Image: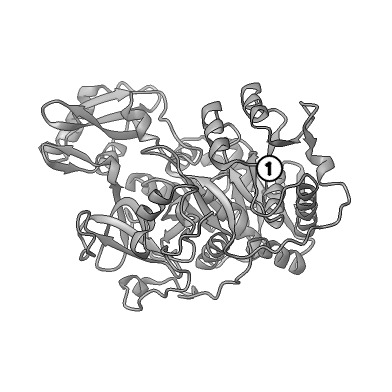
Amino acid sequence: MKHHRSAPSAHRSVPSDRPWFRHWPSGAPKHIDYPQKPLPFLLEDTARRSPDSIAFSSGTDSIAFSKLSQKSDAFASGLHSINIRKGDRVLLLLPNIIEFVISFYGTLKSGAAVVSLHHLVREAELSKALEESEPKAAVILSSLSPAEREVLNKSRVRVIEVGELAASKSISFGQFVSKRRAYPHVSVSADDPAVIQYTGATTGAPKPAVMSHFNLLANAVQNATWFGWDENEKVLGILPLCHTWGCSCCMNSPIYTGAKTIFVGRFDPEVVLQTIEAEHATVLYGSATMFSVLLNSPGIERFNLSSLKWVKAGAMPIPVELKRKWDEKTGIPLVLGYGLTEASPETHDSPPNRIREGTIGIPIIDTDAKIVDLETENELEPGKPGELLIRGPQVTELGYLNDEEETERALRGGWLHTGDIGIMDAEGYFTLVDRKKDIIKYKGYTIYPVELEDLLYGHPAVRECAVVAKKHSEFGEVPKAFIVCKEDSALTEEDVIEFCEKRVAPYKKIREVEFIECLPKTPVGKVLRRKLRDK
């Protein structure tokens, strides 16, 4: 794989006159000296410091840091025994279970890279990923559907199964990590590829982004240091580990600090709220969709959430009304932030004591950001919308797998071009306006869907919504709203259009409304606008 060194440098400092430094969280350093080590160094370091502390729990199962280190060593040895070598790849098709963590860190210790997909992946997506990433082994649940299993069989990868073996040629995960073998001491560097992660693909086809060990290590340290985590934190692991956000904040950061992560299985609002109370969870991450569901759950009134210290929303623009409702209902401020797959993923967070509604906060430690003109790419003055560019130690230098053209486009000039439209105010707070590809062009006017969605979330009958561009023969494009109504709602298209007409400029008004039962989403809750545009 070619290493693209035109990308953002891990050693480039952030200019000291950036306005956001005036709002820097107390206790957080402005620079960190990151270990120039592969990611498993974090696990080994914590296992030495806190060998008997519980690292992860899932139902009645749990594992201490020392045992996690030993099991991941055994997994690495097992991979070596089936001829997996440095530079090879291992596909993980697992939910949030302890076996995922063992497989992930064991793969990295072996010198191979992880290819991470959601365990409910469909045949076409799986086939494409196998063709692109060419893994030599796959770790799956024994309950994997016959259709997906057949795709794996055709690819001739070695299959390691968690649970009762469903195929005679498969390898039992339990036996794989139980056998005594010589540990293969492989030389793995911080710059080596660690994870191939497919982008969220809310606007187009998923792209396989490649993150190095150093990218992931840096983001784990950045995230935990920003909030001041320690070994006493209890993180509720509801974000999927197969996504970079869950991987960083619900696995790597807790491992770095020696904190405990609690898996709850399938997202169920009652179970999540009950677990927060029972486990005295201190950290909760989720998308706007997840927090909306939690707020509408009867359990929000019954369970005690006072143990929570940090509650973070991301993955999509967070409606102001949703944050206000959460803050009022729970008394725990909802921290806002931003990230993307190519940045491992966290780049922006709200200073915990200086949260500004409607913003994504400020760039985190060692992270620089700017807003540039869409045409000239010149840096814009505060208050003007343009493309958000980012650089920092967490940003990929390896780009996209086998796609040099897309890599050079995204990483040109030493900055990651996010494709997101944003604004930086005079104080250094950033506001996400929209995706470049989501902008609606009506008669030459620019309409940002997020503005209309924020407006619709203020309607008492709207549970969820998304606004997309609809082609129009005369006007070019017009805004169309997809709405999920609250129960027993009698909301009509006319009601929605009238509600918007009274609150926005005439050219921005909603022209068409479609009511649907649920919005199509990614595993972390991002709305798949491309699917709505295709309807």
* Image: 192 above or below 152: below
Viewer-side residue, 420 vs 21: 420
Residue sitting at x 50%, y 48%: 401
Where residue 68 appears, as percent x and y from the top left, is 76, 54
Q: How is the structure coloured here?
A: one colour
In the picture, measured across the screen, residue 251 lies left or right of residue 62, that is: left
Which one is in front, 400 or 17?
400
Q: Read off the residue under disc 1.
A: 97
In this view, the residue farthest toward the right is 180
Q: Amino acid at mark 1?
A: Ile
Q: Examine the rendered structure and indicate whether residue 95 appears above or below residue 380.
A: above
Asked if one can make out residue 356 in the rendered structure from this viewpoint, the answer is: yes
In the displayed structure, 197 sits above or below 408; it is above
**Res 368 → quadrant:** bottom left
Q: Count the numbered circles shown.
A: 1
Q: Nearer the viewer, residue 512 or 220?
A: 220
Image: 474 above or below 5: above
Outermost residue on the bottom side: it is 16
User: What percent of the width, then of the height, locates residue 449?
Assistant: 26, 40
Quadrant of the snapshot with the N terminus: bottom right
Q: Quadrant of residue 42?
A: bottom right
Q: Who is closer to the viewer here, 132 or 391?
A: 132
Q: Which of the image's four quarters has the C terminus? A: top left
Picture residue at 45% right of the left edge, 50% below the top? 313
**Side (left or right) of 329 relative to 272:** left
**In the image: residue 166, left or right of residue 4:** right
Q: Is residue 307 visible?
A: no
How many residues crowd mark 1 within 10 Å: few (<14), some (14–19), many (20+)?
many
